[in-house]
Image: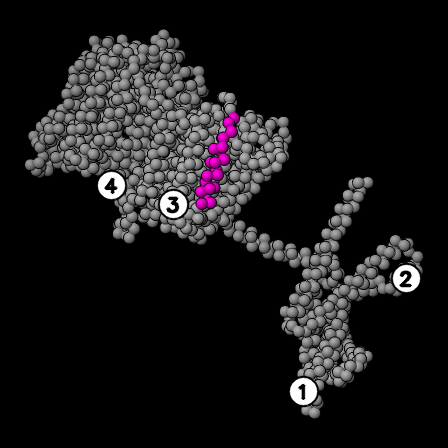
Amino acid sequence: MESQLTTSVLVPLAFLLPILGAVLVVPLTRESPRARGVMLGVCVAATAGIAVSFVPGVLDGTVYETYLLQLTPRIWMYLRVDALGALFGLTASVLWLLALVYSLGYMADEHRQSRYYAFFMLCLAWTMGVAYAGNLLTFLIFYELFSILTYPLVVHEETPDAMAAGTKYIIYILIGGSLVLLAVVFTFFLAGDQTLTTAGILDAGMDHTSLLVIFWCFVAGFGVKAAIMPLHGWVPDAHPAAPAPFSATLSGIMVAAGCFGIMRAVFNVFGVELLAELDVMRWLAYLAAITVVVAALLAVNQDNLKRRLAYSTISQMGYVTLGVALLGEEATAGALVHVANHAFMKGTLFLCAGLLIKQVGLRNVSQLAGIARRMPVTMAAFAVAALGMIGTPPLAGFVSKWYLGLGMLDVDQPLYLAVLLGGALLAAIYLLPIVYAAYFKEPAPLAERSERTGREAPLTMLVPLVVAAALTVVLGAAAAVPGMPLSLARLAAQVVFGG
Amino acid sequence: MEEFAHAGFSPIPALMVLVPLVGALLMRPLGKRSELARDIAAVAISGSVVALAAALVPLVEEYHRVTCYLPGLLGRMHFTVDSFGMLFALFTSFVWFCSTLYSTGYMKHEHARDRYQTVSLVVLAANIGVVLAGDLVTLYLFFEALGLVAYLLVVHTETDEAKKASIKYFWMTVLGGFALVGGILITYALGSTGAIGPIPLEGGSEALRWTAFVLLVAGFGVKAGMLPVHVWLPDAHPVAPSPASALLSGVMIKAGAYGIFRVVEALFRPTLSEELAEEAWHLTSQFGLVILWIGVATMFIGVVLALGQHNAKRMLAYHSVSQMGFILAGIGAAGYLGAHGAMGVAGGLYHVVNHALFKACLFLGVGAVFFRTGELDMYKLGGLWKRMPMTFVFTAIAAAGITGVPLFNGFVSKCLIHHAIVEAWELHGLASLGVAEKIYIVTCGGTACSFIKLIGFVFLGKAKQEYGPEVKDPPVAMLAGMGLLAAFIIALGLRPQILIDGIFTPGLHAWALHPDILQEYLHEYFLSPGDLMSVVIAFAIGFTVFFTGIRFGLFHLHPPKWFGVDYWYRRTAHGFLGFTRVLDRAYGAYLSHASRGLRWLRVNYRAESERLERQWRRFVVTISTGAPGPRNQHFIQRAYVLLERERQATVRYAVTTVVRWLRDHPSFGEERRQPLIDAARDIATYMAGRLQKERMGVLSDMVRTGEIDVVRSAFESVVADLTEFRQPVAHTAIELAERRMAGENVLREISAAMNRIVSDERFDLRLREAAPRQYMIGSAAHLGQTARQALPTPATLRAYQAQGLSRLERAAKWSTDIARLVVETMTQERVSWFMEDRLDAASVALTRRGIQRYARDMSFNIAVIVLVLLAFLLAVAVGNA
């Protein structure tokens, strides 16, 4: 498909608006929290609006771009919205909007709210920058900002656990970040500053050893964020420690950003043909397959709900990496659409976990018996998202698993089907007992008598939750409608594979 | 889909799915207002589905295939109705209607009636969706929905038993779903377009085909209660409310049979052409043989297990397993026979319909008994035919149907399947199929025995308990439900042409199978003596088993637990969960070890780096000063502190002495006292400093020359003795203070006194004397001596010159010696660098020492840097040259 370039001022706005929001947080906090809430909502909604507005154009083959800033005569900060970026930006901004609205309720009686909101907005800004980055250097800048400035959100609660998790997070992320930096510098050295296009920056004429080094640096660097199995250590600690709305974005977007980075490296830095020639992707596929299965196995016995969900995230992101690693069009489409689908499904689950903590003070799976009687809407949303996670049609998870499965067969690797289905089965094993306990187990008499007679949450938290759950249904049942993530994912995969 | 050119379009299939779905939404709001309104609506909606299904009949007759689609999921959800799909839709909706009618009465005993009706309608929609689906994705969608939503029917009563059964049901369903989606994905890989039609033979390997087949059959088989994945069925069907049991056993498991039927007869078959070589059917007949044997095993084991049951509903559930075996055997035989499998298809599907009717009716009948008596144990009932005559009649009709009594529907289908198996046997003369035929007859006998038991124990015979007045026929709605079913059981038994001519013949024709044989059956075999004879044999076996069983109590025998697959599934599941726990613990242990390891590493790293730093400093010290090693260094440091204390003590002593002298001499002018003290202190300070310097010099000299051991051992005691020299210092200070006060230069006198003291003291001698005598033996001492003798002095230097060495050699020697001398002077001089005594205590001394050391290290570092720079400059210079 011929792409046409269009310069658009909206592109930088997508990340400047959240920054503006972050700047305004502090003065407005003194004025009134209400005004602050409205302002934040408007900023994020506008960002999401911008992200949505790109979709029709991108589907028609337009690529929006902006040269932002000249760093040196040779290096520009350059933003570019292609199908891949548009998909990620869309997912991120919409999930952020939900998480923000939820935060307004969730964070109402927490300490240091202005810090939370400021960094929450900044985080969105950097994410949008990552999504729309047009060359490696811009990508790197936003990626590092986004990785490091997330720290205050991870440690927000400032409990010893949170601080320890934060330390773990920052160490992992810094190591990953430096590997990415190394890879970027090396790439720059080999190929200079180039736009991230589908042709790939590197070519087969270059020294193969260097290419391999770059590849593994990219994979290891982004792999830390994407939680590929030996590098996943920060995920199960950071998620339970962070406040619930941020856990949702952490799981749905942050970890996915690692996968997004791998996709950029695979499709735009190396290019599919070069990687096929290097024959490294199957190792990545093995790693991803191990991640899917082992993380899911570990999730089965986690009692802390958010920790269990965190392991689930590791497992699900393994699917995405696996889809990319298979180097097939269908598999890539499946991986891409799974980023979006997973964001909303896991977002829903984390928002539910947040409500359980906030309303009834329960953090552990073993305490959830009979909870659905008190919080029917919350647990219904949980059930929908859990079923979606497993890949039950017509929910979102089914669509991504379907395309991943087709992709696996498309590239003649039917054995990965076992990984795909095994992961889904394990997802059923670690998620559905929660639903069962919530609906059908008798609540422990002690819990019934205790002070925590929480009920359904106020609407500020319930509405985003229900919207996220509804999106889980819509993303599956109406997956084929143009403009849905599936269309973007298929377009992106098509572009990458030169269809 | 080009193969099916004559497809008609009609929205009816989509409507059949949407109507109950929308209707389900109404149940809750209606039920809140009025139960009656809700029940009427539920019956009306299921009735309208029957009407819609009936409306399909003329359409299918005209077009053979009716299609439509709904937008959604991965694009379009297709619906395609052919004769067989229509058949399934017809009986599904009909049985559903009867069951819903029945439930309006029955459910008065149960809670959550709104939920029941809602769920029931959703499951109806899903079930219709399964049998009308036009592509595999749609089929999967509805199949999953059917399985998962029906969970709510199984668990409906929420008793512990129901929950336990529901959990098993649920996991089996989920596993089946995964197998199914895997199989469907592989069919895509084999080249299928997703349509329910033949998969092209070219694509994919044989292994992949078998995998797809196994996965699909397993996926559908779980629902169908196929052996060995039937284990959920006997638990789940009895615990549901009776109308739901009727649906589960009568209709829903048929969705599984439908799937297997489509797998064998639609997916894995050659293209739709009647003139095909035998080889084209090769794979189909292999698959068919597998299914046939699974069917035979299922029917036999099902019936054996059924004979051991007390609970009537549980027995019926085992019969569902067994009857599904009949159906599978029919379908399998059809597959085995390939193009000539019409008899098998007809038998299997006829039995599907029949089983739906009579099993639903049986469950409803037993449910009615439970409704009135609250008892399900067959051995505790009896004699109910008088109390519940209508129920008895309907149940007996259904029992006649299931046992294959002629003129009831089961007779027709069982004979058809029997013929199909015999045909399969005769095709290639496989001896094993002969065995299968025998098993078939025996199974029919077992079935007969079971229902003799059911009817005999529950309705006939003597009552085992006193029945209250409430034990009578159930309400009309329930009787109507059963009656409708019973009517059709008889109708299909009397007029098999309804299905055979109306549905099977055109349907088989559309799928390019030869339907002529069915006509042959109708005309020559239906109610023929041969078929009647086999029924008689079956009943003979049945009665024999029944009486033997009663006589010897065989029905109460139970095999050990490990005999059933269920036990092994449980073991596997628990083993798996145990494995995840082990993994989790192992991972936890790994994490804690890793963090402990990291901590260990950090601690060790710190210790190691400190050690290295110390060594580096020692190295620097040695290089820069040639000074003694760290042991000596430490000693000298301590010695310095001691001597410094001694120096301060000496000065203090002198001042004290002066003050005391002044007290003794009150005549001494008041205004001159302070200056006197100051002068005395100056002198004492100077002298004590000199003394200390001398002593330090002696000490470091000895240390450097290797007499360290000597010095170390004796030093403390020697220093303690040094106090005697405070006296002369103080004395000299008092003596000379007045003169100094007057402004005289007393340096000469001081020096004289110093010389005196030093010569009195002989610090080095004192040290040597105090030391133990063995120092000369010490090799270190010896070495030190040698080294000292080897040291070049100015004299030796001159000697070099005299030797006439070259200028360069001389310079080298000279610079070495100079360096040595410089270092020597530095180390000796440095001892006396800081002489203030204003701050006291060892800390000051140590600080000084530290500063000295730091300065030395720094100077060394700078020297290294300078050297590197020089080397660099040199390199540059060389490079440029």
- Depth order, front residue of B384/B272: B272
Q: Are the residues flagged by discs 1 and 3 from a single subunit?
A: no
Instruction: Please rate how many residues cluster around mark 4, counting C-alpha atoms within 10 Å: few if below 14, some from 14 to 19, many from 20.
Output: few
Tag 3 secondary structure: helix
1 vs 4, front mark: 1
- Depth order, front residue of B85/A215: A215
Estimate the x, y position of residue A124 in percent, counting from the top left: 46, 40
Q: Which residue is mark 1?
A: B660
Instruction: Please rate how many residues cluster around mark 2, counting C-alpha atoms within 10 Å: few if below 14, some from 14 to 19, many from 20.
Output: few
1 vs 2, front mark: 1
Q: Determine the residue positioned at 77% across, 79% down.
A: B757
Q: Which residue is mark 4?
A: B160
- Depth order, front residue of B62/B500: B62
Which mark is first along the chain, 2 or 1? 1
Estimate the x, y position of residue A137 in percent, counting from the top left: 56, 36
Which mark is first along the chain, 4 or 1? 4
Q: Is residue B41 left or right of residue A466?
A: left
- Report, in whole angstroms, how far the alpha carbon at label 1 lies from the one at label 4: 105 Å
Q: Is residue B879 magenta?
A: no
The image quarter in which residue B31 lies: top left
Q: Which residue is mark 3?
A: A35
**Chain under disc 3:** A
**Chain under disc 2:** B
**Chain under disc 4:** B
Question: What span is in magenta?
Answer: A5-24
Estimate the x, y position of residue B86 in percent, counting from the top left: 26, 18
* Disc 4 residue type (three-letter): Asp
Q: Determine the residue positioned at 44% across, 48% down.
A: A26
